[in-house]
Amino acid sequence: MTLAPNQTEKLGRARGDLRLGLPIVLAGEGRTLLAAAVETLGADRLAAMRALGQPELALTARRAETLKTPAYDDDLARLIVPQGAGLDWLNAVADPADDLRVPMKGPFAALRQGSAALHRAALQLAKSAQLLPAAVLVEVADGMAFAVAQGLTFLALTDCSDLFRLAPLEEVVSARLPMVASQAGRVHIFRPDDGGAEHYAIEIGRPDRDHPVLARLHSACFTGDVLGSLKCDCGPQLHAALAQMGSEGAGVLLYLNQEGRGIGLANKMRAYSLQDQGFDTVEANHRLGFEDDERDFRIGAEILRGMGFGTVRLLTNNPRKMAMMESCGIRVAERVALKVGKTPQNAAYLATKAAKSGHLL
Ligand SMILES: Nc1nc2c(ncn2[C@@H]2O[C@H](COP(=O)(O)OP(=O)(O)OP(=O)(O)O)[C@@H](O)[C@H]2O)c(=O)[nH]1
Ligand SMILES: [Zn+2]
């Protein structure tokens, strides 16, 4: 028996530390690097990192592309942080907010030699902490002793697979909830074992587990679901899905806390700000350094399976969702179209999703 954190718990801590602005110590492939997220790093800690050696800035290939600097490590670029460059420089390179106003941020000195595995891990951790995917790293000699002396989280990574492992979800509680759409509602709360966001399942009626269930995988959209945003169709889709389940007397709606297609609300608002500069929803994600869609649909499949559902009639216009369900072992017996909520303000957004993300119009 041990009280010490296991690898999953250390990963959860590492995410929390990055959000706090604390560096973490990453070890693997014969290297030990101190890593911090650009977005939360303070000037004092940057100065302390500089005192240890030459800091490097890790960016995703998506962000590097916008900055017109090569990504020698395929999916990421490692830039040398120039002498005298401070937080303003780091933030300007990491955050596209002022790209149009200040287009020339380079030239950059990019690294080609050595392993990028720990840089990749730092970027993945920043993404899963819902921060901008940009990290400062610097070599430390005896990483374990350094982490202990400074009270920092030490994370040994033999490979990156730990970072992509699906955290098992456990049902914490469920309770009856009468709703406008149905009196026979029940909300189930699922909690992952890595300290990540909880997800919810709204069960309508008592769907037969032996037949395809009318199901919706809804991704959180604070602006659409709560504020009635006209920029997307999420709110009307949420309510139409519940209404259809109510009128059929049975169904399950998963409310997955993967706001902004998995990038988090702060980053989604950064994307909206870029959209006001003229970029579409996909371009905005790329300029921030994200892929078009950072959601993990294994979570939805795992919850459905845990509730006893193996086959669904899926309410969606997104063929990728259907493919992801099938690849995670949930059979999609039928696609049920969900076309509501088109507004003059979201027509271009929906057209972009159809043209670039394969959505069915
Ligand atoms: N990053 C980003 N996320 C957005 C934007 N507009 C809406 N979202 C998010 O996109 C997600 C919408 O998810 P879903 O309703 O599952 O939509 P979908 O993948 O298009 O598929 P279906 O609605 O099932 O057809 C929510 O998490 C929203 O917060 C945007 O411009 N940028
Ligand atoms: Zn939305």
Image (cartoon, rainbow, N blue to C red):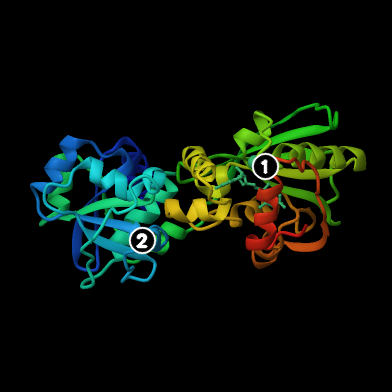
Residue nearest the observer in this picture, 32 or 98? 98
Q: Residue at x 38, y 48 (%)?
A: 99
Rate crowding at label 2 as few (under 14), some (14 to 19) or many (20 or more) other CA atoms within 10 Å.
many
Q: Is mark 1 within 8 Å of ligand 2?
A: yes
Residue 3 can be seen, yes or no? no
Rate crowding at label 1 as few (under 14), some (14 to 19) or many (20 or more) other CA atoms within 10 Å.
many
Q: Which mark is residue 8?
A: none
Q: Residue at x 77, y 41 (%)?
A: 341
Q: Position of residue 303 (x, y in %)?
A: 65, 50
Residue located beneath label 2 in the image: 64
Name the side, left or right, on which 30 lies relative to 103.
left
Q: Secondary structure at mark 1?
A: loop
Q: Which mark is residue 232?
A: 1
Q: Secondary structure at mark 2?
A: helix
Q: Position of residue 63 (x, y in %)?
A: 39, 57
Q: Residue at x 47, y 56 (%)?
A: 286
Q: Position of residue 280 (x, y in %)?
A: 57, 51
The amino acid type found where label 2 is placed reads Ala
Quarter holding the C terminus is bottom right
Residue nearest the observer in this picture, 289 or 10? 289
The amino acid type found where label 1 is placed reads Cys
Vertical relation: 66 (above or below) 245: below
Q: Position of residue 150 (x, y in %)?
A: 15, 40
Q: Residue at x 40, y 48 (%)?
A: 100
Residue 60 can be seen, yes or no? yes
The quarter of the rendering in which ligand 2 is drawn is top right
Q: Earlier in the sequence, mark 2 or mark 1?
A: 2
- Label 2 – label 1 distance at C-alpha: 28 Å
Name the side, left or right, on which 309 lies relative to 273.
right
